[in-house]
């Protein structure tokens, strides 16, 4: 990773229906009533948002709900909210207004609207390796093009009881969104199968797969869906980012 600031696209996944546990924790908080509440996911690959199948939170992490303005509330880690407050996302520079706090595990099963996704509604699901020190602590999941996402989603499909999820929340298949010469139109599943990656605990293998899929997609990929179908990924990436920003479904931030 470079020494300069990393630019992320913040993706706003609007809450449609809270999980039972989240409803218990948040349901009585007056300041959340009638607000637009968004999980904020940080991504380096805005052009892949067409293929979102779910969104991950870390099971060991705690999240805050932060007032952004009179209508909008962002859900992310405190660290990310503070960082955003220094980049002009709060009414007073550097000041965060936390309305509530909730554990990642309580958020699982919440139904959200993921911008641009071919699936109209997706669910918040658990992932073991979400870092508290990176992004927003919310990782939107694109299993077609991210080996980490693919493997974590496979784990959930295989062992719903162990992960304490309803199988229907993970019943979304990877979507072919980018075609690549080397690995076809489901690059992450293909490379994970070739490398015989069996679980999200295979960290070393996953890091290799991530590098391979990222490079192939970025340099040789062609968009199969969406507003820039037929364009090269390199070309589509800033265009999709601008589309998300101009429609209010995303924003650019640095860390
Ligand atoms: B990317 P970098 Cl399709 N913990 O978005 C773990 N991973 C995190 C994270 C956190 N706290 N915050 C963000 N990320 C993930 C899409 C994607 C991503 C695809 C392919 C590769 C890929 C869909 N998930 O990232 O350390 C997010 O997943 C591979 C590098 O700042 C984010 O972009 O380089 C990326 O890692 C940021 O990682």
Image (spheres, rainbow, N blue to C red):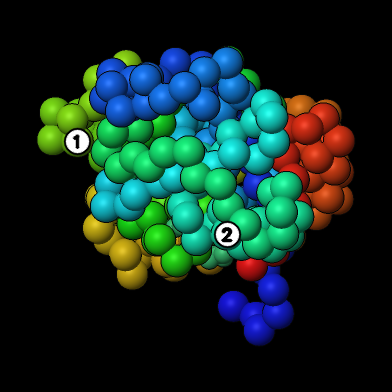
Q: Position of residue 200 (x, y in %)?
A: 29, 52
Q: Residue at x 78, y 32 (%)?
A: 248
Q: CA distance from mark 2 to mark 1?
A: 31 Å
Q: Is mark 1 within 8 Å of ligand 1?
A: no
Drawn side of residue 200 relative to residue 8, left or right:
left
* Along the line of sight, the residue nearer the viewer: 25 or 255: 25
- On screen, 7 above or below 77? below
- On screen, 228 above or below 63? above
The residue pinned by badge 2 equals 82
Q: Is residue 198 visible?
A: yes
- On screen, 38 above or below 191? above
Drawn side of residue 103 relative to residue 149, left or right:
left
The residue pinned by badge 1 equals 163
Task: Give the SS element for disc 2.
Answer: helix
Q: Position of residue 51 (x, y in %)?
A: 59, 32
Name the image quarter holding the N terminus: bottom right
Quarter occupied by residue 172: top left
* Along the line of sight, the residue nearer the viewer: 185 or 15: 15
Which of the labelled discs sits on residue 52, or is there none? none
Of callouts 2 and 1, which one flags the residue occurring earlier in the amino acid sequence? 2
Q: Position of residue 33 (x, y in %)?
A: 52, 18
Q: Position of residue 228 (x, y in %)?
A: 84, 34
* Along the line of sight, the residue nearer the viewer: 12 or 68: 68
């Amino acid at each position: 990773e470079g020494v300069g600031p990393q630019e992320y696209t913040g993706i706003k996944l609007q809450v449609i229906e809270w999980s039972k546990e989240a409803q218990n924790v948040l349901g009585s908080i007056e300041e959340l009533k009638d607000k637009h509440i968004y999980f904020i996911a940080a991504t380096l690959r805005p052009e892949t948002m067409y293929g979102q199948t779910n969104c991950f939170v870390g099971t060991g992490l705690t999240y805050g709900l932060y007032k952004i303005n009179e209508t909008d509330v962002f859900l992310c880690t405190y660290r990310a909210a503070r960082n955003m407050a220094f980049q002009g996302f709060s009414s007073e520079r550097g000041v965060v207004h936390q309305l509530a706090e909730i554990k990642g595990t309580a958020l699982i099963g919440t139904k959200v609207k993921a911008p641009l996704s071919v699936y109209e509604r997706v669910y918040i699901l658990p992932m073991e390796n979400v870092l508290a020190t990176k992004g927003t602590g919310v990782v939107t999941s694109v299993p077609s093009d991210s080996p980490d996402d693919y493997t974590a989603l496979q784990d959930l499909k295989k062992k719903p009881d162990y992960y304490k999820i309803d199988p229907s929340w993970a019943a979304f298949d990877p979507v072919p969104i980018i075609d690549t010469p080397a690995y076809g139109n489901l690059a992450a599943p293909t490379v994970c199968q070739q490398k015989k990656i069996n679980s999200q605990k295979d960290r070393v293998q996953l890091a290799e797969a991530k590098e391979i899929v990222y490079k192939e997609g970025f340099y040789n990929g062609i968009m199969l869906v969406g507003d820039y179908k037929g364009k090269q990924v390199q070309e589509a990436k800033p265009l999709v980012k601008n589309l998300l920003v101009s429609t209010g479904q995303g924003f650019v931030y640095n860390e």
